[in-house]
Image (tube, rainbow, N blue to C red):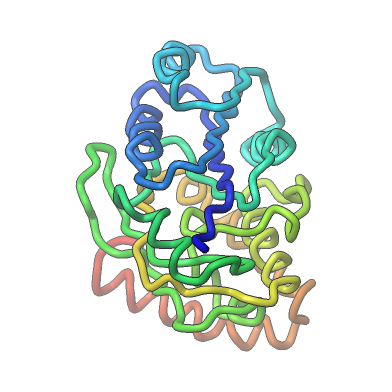
C-alpha cells in the first residue's frame, strides 16, 4: 500500500513581488498532490498580495499581517499547518523538480526526517552551483557539530517532532530547530536527491556574521564549549579554502 502523507509546505514572504511567483509555481507543478500550501505574508506593501490572490487555487491558507521577523512568521505557518510533515520553502526558493516530493516520500515511507542536496540560484533563476556544505551520507544531531550540513530548505520533518522556532535567535533559529528535531528522530532518510533551489543572497547571507555568532552559542549549548571550539577550527579552515577556490560563500 502506497504511503501518501500530507505535506504542509510553508512560504514566508515580505515584499516578494519579484520572488514569490517562482516559488508558488514550483509547488503548483508537483506531481505529488497531497500538499497543503501555506503562505505567511508580513504585511507587504508591494504587489505580493495580488500574486497571492492570483494563485489562490494553489494556496490552501494564507494570512497577511505584520510579524516580529522571519521566525515569528514561520511559527505562524506551523500553527496553521495540519500536515504530517513540514517543509519550509521561502519566497525566492523553489522545489527542485516536478517529481521531487513524489520521489522523496517513496525513498523511505514514514521516515521522521527527509533530507537532500541544495543548489544555489541567482535572482534570474540561473544555477550558480551546489551549496558550499555538502550533505553527509548519514545525518544525525551530532553531525551539526561541523556546521549546518543540510539546508533548511532541503529538510522535511514530521510535524510531531518540532516545536516553535526560538525567537531569541534572529538569524540562526533554523539551525537550532533542525538540530532539536534530529535529537528526537528515530529515522532520518537521505533521499540522495536535490530537494531545493535556494536563492543566493537572502536573509541568512545578508546577516552572516550575527548568524554565525548565534550558531556558535547554540552549538555551545548543545555540544559544550570545548567541542564547539575544536570543530570551529575545521569549520573555519574549510570556509576559507572554499572562498579562495570558488570566490563565493
Please state the horizontal and vertical placement of residue 36, each as a whole percent of the image. 56, 37
Q: Residue at x 39, y 21 (%)?
A: 17
Q: Quadrant of the C terminus?
A: bottom left
Q: Residue at x 50, y 85 (%)?
A: 234
Compare residues 135 and 159 and report the one nearer the observer.
159
Q: Is residue 34 above or below residue 80?
A: below
Please state the horizontal and vertical placement of residue 106, each as a whole percent of the image. 44, 65
Q: Is residue 226 above or below residue 222?
A: below
| Left or right: residue 62 compared with residue 129 | right
| Left or right: residue 138 compared with residue 117 | right
Q: Residue at x 74, y 56 (%)?
A: 162
- Numbered circles on residues, count: 0
Q: Residue at x 52, y 73 (%)?
A: 189
Please state the horizontal and vertical placement of residue 211, each as a whole percent of the image. 59, 55
Please state the horizontal and vertical placement of residue 54, each as a whole percent of the image. 40, 14
Residue extending farthest front: 1
Amino acid at each position: 500500500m502506497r504511503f501518501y502523507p500530507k505535506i504542509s509546505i510553508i512560504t514566508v514572504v515580505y515584499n516578494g513581488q519579484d520572488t514569490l511567483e517562482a516559488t508558488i509555481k514550483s509547488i503548483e507543478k508537483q506531481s505529488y498532490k497531497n500538499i497543503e500550501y501555506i503562505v505567511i505574508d508580513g504585511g507587504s506593501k508591494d504587489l505580493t498580495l495580488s500574486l497571492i490572490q492570483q494563485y489562490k487555487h494553489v494556496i490552501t491558507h494564507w494570512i497577511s499581517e505584520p510579524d516580529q521577523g522571519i521566525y515569528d512568521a514561520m511559527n505562524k505557518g506551523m500553527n496553521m499547518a495540519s500536515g504530517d510533515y513540514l517543509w519550509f520553502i521561502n519566497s525566492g526558493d523553489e522545489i527542485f523538480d516536478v517529481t521531487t516530493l513524489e520521489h522523496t516520500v517513496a525513498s523511505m515511507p514514514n521516515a521522521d526526517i527527509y533530507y537532500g542536496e541544495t543548489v544555489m540560484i541567482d535572482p534570474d533563476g540561473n544555477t550558480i552551483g551546489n551549496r558550499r556544505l555538502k550533505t553527509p551520507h548519514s545525518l544525525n544531531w551530532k553531525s551539526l557539530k561541523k556546521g549546518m550540513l543540510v539546508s533548511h530548505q532541503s529538510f522535511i520533518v514530521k510535524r510531531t517532532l518540532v516545536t516553535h522556532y526560538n525567537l531569541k535567535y534572529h538569524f540562526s533559529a533554523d539551525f537550532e530547530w533542525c538540530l532539536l528535531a534530529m535529537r528526537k528522530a528515530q529515522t532520518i532518510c537521505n533521499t540522495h536527491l536535490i530537494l531545493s533551489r535556494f536563492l543566493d543572497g537572502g536573509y541568512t547571507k545578508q546577516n552572516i556574521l550575527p548568524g554565525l555568532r548565534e550558531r556558535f552559542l547554540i552549538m555551545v549549548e548543545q555540544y559544550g564549549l570545548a567541542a564547539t571550539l575544536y570543530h570551529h577550527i575545521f569549520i573555519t579552515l574549510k570556509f576559507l579554502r572554499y572562498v579562495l577556490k570558488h570566490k563565493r560563500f
